[in-house]
Image (tube, helix red, strand yellow):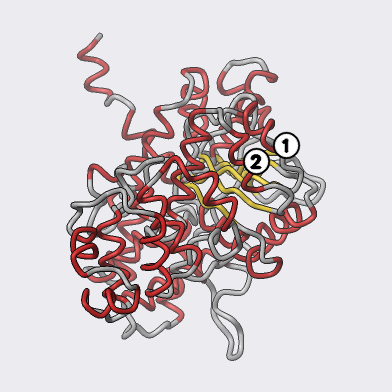
Amino acid sequence: MNSDSAPGLDALLQNARRRAGLTQVQLAGLATVSVRAIRDLEQGRVRSPRKDTLRLLADALRMSDARRVELELAVDAHAAGRVLQSLYSAELAAPPPPLHPLIGRRAELDALVERLETGRDRLLTLVGLPGAGKSRLAQEAALVLHARNRMPVVWVPMDGAADAVARGPQAPLADWVRTLVRDGDRFEELTAVIGAKPTLIVLDGADDAVPVASVLSLLSACEQLRVVVTSRRASRPPAGRLLPLAPLPAPAPGPAGPVRPGDSLTTGRPAVELMLSYVSHMRPDLLLTDAVVASVAGICHHMDGIPQALEAAASWLLLYSPHQLLETARTAPLTLVDGVVPAAEGAGGGLGAMLGAALGELEPEAAGLLTVLAGLPEPWTVDAAARAAGRPLADTARDVHGLLLRGLVRQHAPEPDGPVGFTVLNLVRALTAARLPSPALTAAAR
């Protein structure tokens, strides 16, 4: 277990006592434990207290089962399996609470919940572009299952973002499961904990290869277990059924059109609805006139409907008007993707860095094809892409499929009975152009 990121016994006990509004003397009286023993525990002088002492203190502090697990695991990490097996419950295993409502993903949410609830698919991988909302969709599905069926949910941050999820009673459980998954062994301990209880495990941000064989063994041993993996790329072999998550549908460029009294500003336009929610937070004084909504729709188009990109772009409204922001999104969209205050270097970088990393992970053939596709009139077909790249159709189709799974290109709404067309995301096109050498540099190199 990753004890480095979890609070120690001293901090846990001191925080619990302060939450209860008790002094050390008052706690000693309630727990029939000496004041000196409590003082030594809170100052870290005693790290292996007797179990009876912990039980008396937990009873006096009226700790929940989840808090008792956290307290005991702070003393003995090797007791994880035994402790969790005796106290495993929906209260202990709960998804992290959302910071904002889910917008524009109703169809995807219903499909995901239905698959998990019925157990039709027990291993699912949500794959797509960074910032597209994979984690948020998985979180909402977990919340539905937890609330509707009291299904325990073990939310496991796999990408080093554990600090981004509030540390709490569920943290020791998540740390333990993450260690088991990464090591790919000792799954019998987790099997003993879960047993026959319907359970959902979310491996969030599993961009590195998940030991699929080990997870399949775990699923075989726990017949009621479901596993959801979120990743920006599909593993080989795939971790169960792949569910590509594209950005929200982006409005076509051009004016939004007049809005008649009683009409919704956002009907059928989830990206605009989400962007307007960010606008209302940034600029509650801003009147949503037709002109403002038209500018917001244009921003959504140029930022590709990527939820994280829209949130970052909205932060610039503290400095610019919607019309100014639209002009920037049209001419230099990459300057907006990280917001007014970029992410810290040690936190995995901002969205721009993550998008750049997604391009950098492409195989040379796929990267070369993407450069060609970025220059084609849109929408283009797979046949047109093969002709433009001078490559066999089968190879081109395979690479376009891979680009679709990564979210770098998106399907264009086809006409009835017409061929399926595709477009390269605006931000991806801008990144590709930024990576190409300038004509002057190319001539000098020659």
Q: CA gap, disc 1 to disc 2?
A: 7 Å
Against 171, residue 230 (above or below) is above
Q: Nearer the viewer, residue 122 or 444?
A: 122
Is residue 378 visible to us here? no
Is residue 444 visible to us here? yes
Mark 2: which amino acid? Thr
Q: Residues within 10 Å of mark 2 (few under 14, many from 20)?
A: some
Q: Nearer the viewer, residue 220 or 418?
A: 220
Please name the residue shown 70% across and 47% down the image: 195
**Quadrant location, the N terminus:** top left
Question: In the visual, does 194 lie left or right of 39?
Answer: right
Question: In the visual, does 78 lie left or right of 44?
Answer: right
Q: Which residue is mark 1?
A: 221
Mark 1: which amino acid? Ala
Disc tally is 2
Indicate the position of residue 245 as horizontal and vertical percent values. Answer: 59, 48
Indicate the position of residue 408 as horizontal and vertical percent values. Answer: 51, 39
Against 365, residue 294 (above or below) is below
Question: In the visual, does 239 lie left or right of 257?
Answer: right
Q: Are marks 1 and 2 in contact (CB under 8 Å)?
A: yes
Residue 63: which disc? none
Q: Nearer the viewer, residue 139 or 214?
A: 214
Indicate the position of residue 379 as horizontal and vertical percent values. Answer: 60, 42
Against 52, residue 354 (above or below) is above
Question: In the visual, does 384 lie left or right of 424?
Answer: right
Mark toward the start of the polypeptide (1 vs 2):
2
Q: SS at mark 2?
A: helix
Outermost top residue: 446
Please name the residue shown 36% across and 36% down the image: 356
Q: Which residue is mark 2?
A: 191
